[in-house]
Every structure is written in structure tokens, then in C-alpha cells.
Image (cartoon, helix red, strand yellow):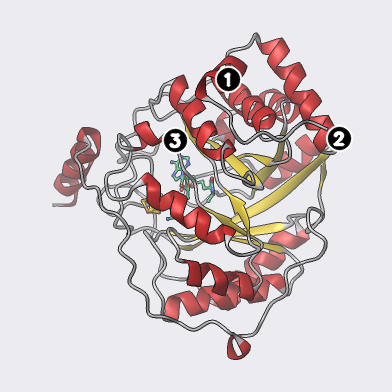
């Protein structure tokens, strides 16, 4: 078994990322085999339970209200709608449903109560439930855990230094605080980031330093390739080369041997041969379904054919824990709605490309 190390430095990680590719692949595949069944892949489906109209200025995101993108916004879905979609995903071989909301942070109240009910409902379908709802407090994390949440996704997105070039409305330290709040419960942590936002290789290594110095490591690390969406500040970014994705996946695998490394956004631009190299390099989970949150994803049939060609088998839910989390009904909850109004950081420095995209959005709307 590989040793689990929590004090990786940027230099060590860069040295791994920049190895000759054949050496990097061999090393990553070896670590992968020592820690995982290389033929198993965990399949999640994404469900955008509340879409668009977000107050944040994340430079990559089509759901930020200030940019003018073509997406269709939606209020919070009903529990019944969520149940129907979860059942469909289950019959398609998905073991996990990941519900995303275009919120800066969770606010106590009716909407959050409804999300808790969605968590209970999916848990009862014997599926893993994941949520990505923005920043959460310790009490909110405990309420999600009590409802039966399996994982909470909260991405660091990039290095602490480059984060300031991407988002001005929230701080890196609040992202870390949220992950620490999740860690105070038995919910597993899903945290990763995006490559292809104009960051340097040093920033990719910096993000992996932040992730791999968490103790324990996140149970799941999504590696997204930026999907450049028209109207966002990053609309003109070049799509990342597959080689960069392969290097990022392999490096994440080596520095976090036991973690599920998730080949996430950007797969529509990748060939199946390219994706196969990512699986060889240690990726062992994906998002399946024709849509991510708002942007396209490969056809489910195509993915299933790819699995067949590669001999990959979708894993059953809860194989990484002893049993599925229990769910407590709302009326039996030991945690109250505290009506919290936490003061999450608002750095509000200026990011030129975000300001330009915002001004362009305003002009188009007028
Ligand atoms: N609002 C919540 C938050 O920001 O934490 C949850 C939803 S947010 C859309 C989830 C993640 O999707 C982001 O952290 C980011 O990593 C990823 N994402 C958003 N837009 C993307 C894009 N255009 N390309 C790749 N990944 C993207
Ligand atoms: C993650 O790291 N990637 C997923 C999930 N976690 C929530 C989201 C990708 C979103 C891509 C852009 C979109 O479809 O809006
Ligand atoms: Fe909002 Fe999340 Fe998109 Fe940022 S990434 S704009 S917080 S939905």
C-alpha cells in the first residue's frame, strides 16, 4: 500500500506533474492498483435543483446573474421532481446523485428544509446523496448529515493565489472553513477544481497542495476542465489539452492515493482514447447524464459503450463505507433551524475580466 502523506510541497507536486509522461502514467497506475480496483468506476448524476441567478462573480460560471449567458434559470425543484430524476439515474446504473444549487451559501428556512427532504428521499432509494449548495455552517452540516447526506461537494477551484483572479465575492478561507464544517460530521468531502482558466502549472500544483494537506484527504476530488461559456469572463479560454488533464489526474492520484479522482466537466471535448488514459492514470469516477448542471455532457449510451470497450464496471453504492448513512425524519431531528446569518467573507477586490463581462452583460440586457 502507498503511504498517505499530508505534507506535500508545491515543489514535490510540480516535480511529479512534470515527469516524462510514460513515467508519470506508470507511477500513477501503480498507485491506483495498490489502492483501488482499476476496473471499477463510480458513476454520479448531476441534478441542478436551483439554477441561475447567483449573486457571486465566479469567472467560470454560467449561473452568475451578472453575466449574460443563455442558460435557463429555475427556482428550487420539488421533492417529487428530484425523486423521479433520481429513480431514472438509478435505473441507468448511477450510484450517486449530486444536487447543485446556485447559492453563495445556505440560508436556514423553507428552501433548506426542502433540500433536507430531498436528501432523505434519495437516501431511502439506496443511493449515495451529494449536495453542493455553497458555504455551510457547522449546524447546517450536522442537519445534512442527520438527513442522510453521503458527500458534500465544495471546490477550492484553484490555488489560493489564483483564486483572487477568478472570484472577488468570496474568499478561499471560507471555502476551507466550509470543508472543515463538513468534517465535523460523518459526511464525506468532495473537493477539487478546474483547469484551463488561464492559471499557471504552479497554481494547479498549489491547488493539489491545499487538497492533499487536508487530513484526512477529501474522499473525492473532481478535476474539471473549464467549459468556456459565452457571456462569462472566461468565454475565450482555449479548451485544455487532454495531456494536461491526464497529468492533473495522474498527479492527484499519486498525492492522494485513496481518494476517488473524478473526471468531471469537459468530457464532451475529450476523445474516448483520451478518457481511457485518464482512467489508466487513476480517474475512477465520472458524472454521467447528458447534462452537467447547465452545460452538455456525453450521451449516456456513449458512456456505457465506452465502459464496455474498456471493461469498466459501474460500482454499487456505499462500497467505501460499512453501511449507508441513516436518515432521521424532520420531526425527530435533534438539530434546530438556528436562523443563522453567518458573515462569510466578501473580499470585493476588482477583477478586470469579470468587470468587463458584467458590463457587456448589462449592455446586452438593455
Ligand atoms: N454554488 C455552489 C458553489 O459554488 O459552491 C455549487 C454549484 S457550483 C456550479 C459547483 C462547481 O462547478 C464550481 O465550484 C466549479 O468548480 C464547477 N463549475 C462551474 N462552472 C464551470 C465551468 N464552466 N466549467 C467547469 N467547471 C465549472
Ligand atoms: C464539480 O466539480 N463539477 C460539477 C459538480 N462538481 C457540481 C459541476 C460542473 C459544472 C459545469 C458547468 C455547468 O454545467 O454549469
Ligand atoms: Fe454561484 Fe456557485 Fe456559480 Fe459561483 S460557482 S456563480 S457560487 S453557482
Circle nearer the viewer, 3 or 1: 1
Q: Mark 3 and 2 residues: CB-CB less than 8 Å, in contact?
A: no
Give the residue at x 66% y 65%.
86
For residue 350, side relative to residue 222 (left or right): left
Q: CA distance from mark 3 to mark 2?
A: 33 Å
Residue 120 at x, y percent in the picture:
64, 76
> Earlier along the polypeptide chain: callout 3 or callout 1?
1
Mark 1 or 2: in front is 1
Q: Is residue 254 above or below residue 347?
A: above
Q: Is residue 338 above or below residue 23?
A: below
Q: Earlier in the sequence, mark 3 or mark 2?
A: 3
Residue on which the image places disc 3:
158
Give whichever of 9, 249 is nearer the camera: 9
Query: Residue drawn at (24%, 34%), measured in percent from left and top?
Result: 353
Identify the residue position indicated by label 1 in the image: 12
Left or right, 57 with respect to 108, comes to left
Q: Position of residue 215 (x, y in %)?
A: 61, 45
Question: Which mark, by number, is residue 311?
Answer: 2
Amino acid at each position: 500500500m502507498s503511504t498517505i502523506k499530508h505534507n506535500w510541497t508545491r515543489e514535490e507536486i510540480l516535480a511529479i506533474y512534470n515527469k516524462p509522461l510514460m513515467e508519470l502514467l506508470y507511477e500513477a497506475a501503480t498507485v491506483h492498483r495498490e489502492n483501488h480496483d482499476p476496473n471499477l468506476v463510480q458513476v454520479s448524476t448531476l441534478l441542478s435543483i436551483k439554477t441561475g441567478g447567483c449573486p457571486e462573480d465566479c469567472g467560470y460560471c454560467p449561473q452568475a446573474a451578472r453575466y449574460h449567458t443563455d442558460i435557463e434559470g429555475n427556482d428550487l425543484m420539488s421533492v417529487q421532481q428530484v425523486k423521479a430524476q433520481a429513480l431514472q439515474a438509478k435505473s441507468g446504473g448511477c450510484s450517486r446523485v449530486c444536487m447543485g444549487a446556485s447559492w453563495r451559501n445556505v440560508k436556514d428556512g423553507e428552501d433548506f428544509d426542502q433540500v433536507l427532504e430531498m436528501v432523505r428521499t434519495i437516501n431511502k432509494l439506496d443511493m449515495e446523496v451529494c449536495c453542493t449548495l455553497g458555504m455551510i455552517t457547522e449546524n447546517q452540516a450536522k442537519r445534512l448529515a442527520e438527513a442522510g447526506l453521503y458527500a458534500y461537494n465544495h471546490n477550492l477551484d484553484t490555488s489560493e493565489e489564483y483564486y483572487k483572479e477568478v472570484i472577488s465575492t468570496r474568499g478561499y478561507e471560507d471555502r476551507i472553513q466550509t470543508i472543515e464544517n463538513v468534517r465535523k460530521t460523518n459526511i464525506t468531502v468532495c473537493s477539487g477544481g478546474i483547469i484551463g482558466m488561464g492559471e499557471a502549472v504552479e497554481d494547479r500544483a498549489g491547488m493539489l497542495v491545499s487538497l492533499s494537506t487536508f487530513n484526512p484527504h477529501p474522499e473525492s476530488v473532481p478535476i474539471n476542465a473549464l467549459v468556456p461559456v459565452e457571456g462569462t469572463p472566461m468565454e475565450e479560454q482555449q479548451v485544455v489539452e487532454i495531456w494536461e488533464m491526464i497529468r492533473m489526474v495522474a498527479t492527484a492520484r499519486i498525492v492522494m492515493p485513496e481518494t476517488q479522482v473524478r473526471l468531471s466537466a469537459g468530457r464532451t471535448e475529450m476523445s474516448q482514447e483520451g478518457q481511457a488514459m485518464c482512467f489508466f492514470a487513476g480517474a475512477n469516477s465520472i458524472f454521467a447524464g447528458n447534462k452537467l448542471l447547465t452545460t452538455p455532457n456525453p450521451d449516456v449510451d456513449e458512456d456505457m459503450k465506452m465502459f464496455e470497450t474498456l471493461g469498466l464496471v459501474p460500482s454499487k453504492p456505499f462500497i467505501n463505507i460499512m453501511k449507508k448513512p441513516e436518515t432521521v425524519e424532520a420531526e425527530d431531528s435533534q438539530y434546530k433551524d438556528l436562523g443563522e446569518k453567518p458573515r462569510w467573507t466578501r473580499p470585493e477586490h476588482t477583477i478586470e475580466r469579470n468587470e468587463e463581462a458584467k458590463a457587456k452583460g448589462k449592455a446586452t440586457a438593455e
